[in-house]
Image: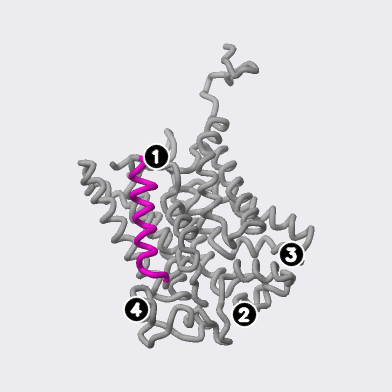
């Protein structure tokens, strides 16, 4: 089904679903290319595996439902889900991880609820959370960024590791995860969280090799990748594909929470810039939380929705069991969308607000 989307009754910028999805995929390219540069060809291999899986899954289910699967696939919504899921998982994760996650996102989260426009949860994030909870070891096998890894790898190595678990030269994923000092390296968020839990201060934790020596608190690759996705997100706002309310609400709330807690105790709580440029909060703010199906529909509601996601991101990152929290925060607030929309719906022009008594009955 191809929906026509317009920005408002007084503007005639109308795009169908396929055009919007293609623009979002195009906006993802700077971040995806930077992610490939720093973490290897595995990122693109995972993207291709995810795209093949979602296309086959969606076509098979729609064929069983006696629906036109060709037009559904041409709307690119499934392909966008595949890209978002693929770039969220480690580049060298086993092939069955991305296949299982992609199948779950389309078959269970999207089609089980009726297809595009009816899903309650963001399919990519629901698939990611399912994988993270079910297969935590495989979902945390991030390699060191280029320049810090002990063993180099190319496209053939990516294929070999993803499908066999070993590189062309026989190195396992555990060996590829080691840095030039022979130490297994984690993500910046996980590194800082673990270090603080081991009674190191925040200042001490960001002196580890995963962090940039020139810009304290920023991961060697994280800042560039985040800026790549930020560039794409700003392009979407300029083209009126998304509104600014959700990204601004989400990022502002997370940074404000970080600043307040950092002022209270800078030895334990990282700075606002640390939370902003590490992890997936930038891509979450511009590409995931803004999903038009599972997000709020009013501008006031979008601000509330984004701010609440930002709050949950900070809470889970700081006190939760996972170093990053964007996927969990988005799914939590997906459940609250009907309530937020109800209380933030605009008043109809020319009508006064409906008054209710204490029992919630209309008095007019």
How far apart, in angstroms, are the residues tagged by discs 3 and 2?
19 Å
Q: Residue furthest front?
A: 134
How far apart, in angstroms, are the residues tagged by discs 4 and 2?
28 Å
Hey, which quadrant is residue 6 in on the image?
top left
Helix, strand or loop status at disc 3: loop
Q: Which mark is residue 160?
A: 4
How far apart, in angstroms, are the residues tagged by discs 3 and 4?
41 Å
Question: Could you tell me residue 349's position as x and y percent?
Answer: 52, 23
Hey, which quadrant is residue 346 in on the image?
top right
Disc 4 crowd, CA 10 A, few/some/many (<14, 14-19, 20+): some
* Image-based side of 117 in relation to 150, left or right: left
Sequence-earlier tag: 1 or 3: 1
Question: Could you tell me residue 88's position as x and y percent?
Answer: 46, 62
Disc 1 crowd, CA 10 A, few/some/many (<14, 14-19, 20+): some
Q: Nearer the viewer, mark 3 or mark 2?
A: 3
Question: Could you tell me residue 99's position as x and y percent?
Answer: 34, 61
Q: Is residue 227 above or below residue 340?
A: below
Q: Which mark is residue 268?
A: 3
Sequence-earlier tag: 4 or 2: 4
Q: Which mark is residue 6?
A: 1
Q: Residue furthest right?
A: 264
* Image-based side of 47 in relation to 360, left or right: left
Helix, strand or loop status at disc 4: helix
């Amino acid at each position: 089904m191809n929906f026509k989307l317009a920005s408002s009754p007084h503007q005639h910028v109308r795009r169908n679903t396929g055009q919007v999805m293609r623009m979002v995929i195009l906006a993802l390219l700077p971040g995806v290319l930077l992610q490939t540069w720093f973490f290897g060809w595995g990122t693109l291999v995972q993207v291709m595996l995810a795209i093949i899986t979602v296309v086959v899954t969606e076509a098979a289910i729609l064929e069983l439902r006696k629906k036109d699967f060709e037009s559904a696939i041409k709307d690119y919504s499934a392909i966008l889900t595949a890209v978002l899921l693929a770039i969220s998982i480690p580049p060298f994760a086993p092939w069955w991880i991305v296949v299982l996650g992609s199948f779950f996102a389309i078959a269970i989260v999207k089609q089980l609820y009726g297809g595009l426009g009816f899903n309650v949860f963001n399919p990519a994030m629901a698939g990611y959370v399912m994988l993270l909870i079910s297969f935590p070891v495989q979902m945390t096998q991030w390699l060191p960024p280029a320049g810090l890894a002990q063993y180099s790898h190319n496209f053939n190595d990516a294929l070999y590791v993803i499908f066999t678990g070993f590189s062309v030269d026989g190195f396992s994923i555990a060996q590829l995860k080691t840095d030039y000092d022979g130490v297994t390296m984690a993500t910046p968020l996980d590194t800082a969280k673990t270090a603080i839990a081991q009674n190191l201060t925040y200042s001490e934790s960001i002196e580890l090799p995963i962090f940039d020596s020139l810009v304290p608190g920023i991961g060697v690759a994280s800042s560039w990748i985040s800026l790549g996705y930020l560039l794409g997100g700003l392009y979407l706002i300029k083209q009126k594909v998304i509104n600014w309310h959700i990204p601004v609400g989400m990022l502002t709330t997370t940074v404000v929470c970080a600043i307040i807690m950092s002022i209270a105790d800078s030895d334990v709580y990282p700075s606002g810039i640390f939370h902003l440029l590490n992890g997936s909060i930038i891509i979450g703010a511009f590409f995931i939380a803004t999903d038009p199906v599972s997000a709020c529909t009013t501008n006031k509601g979008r601000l509330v929705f984004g701010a609440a996601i930002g709050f949950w991101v900070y809470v889970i990152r700081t006190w939760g069991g996972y170093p990053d929290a964007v996927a969990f925060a988005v799914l939590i607030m997906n459940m609250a969308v009907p309530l937020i929309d109800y209380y933030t719906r605009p008043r109809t022009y020319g009508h006064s607000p409906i008054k209710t008594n204490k029992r919630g009955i209309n008095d007019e």
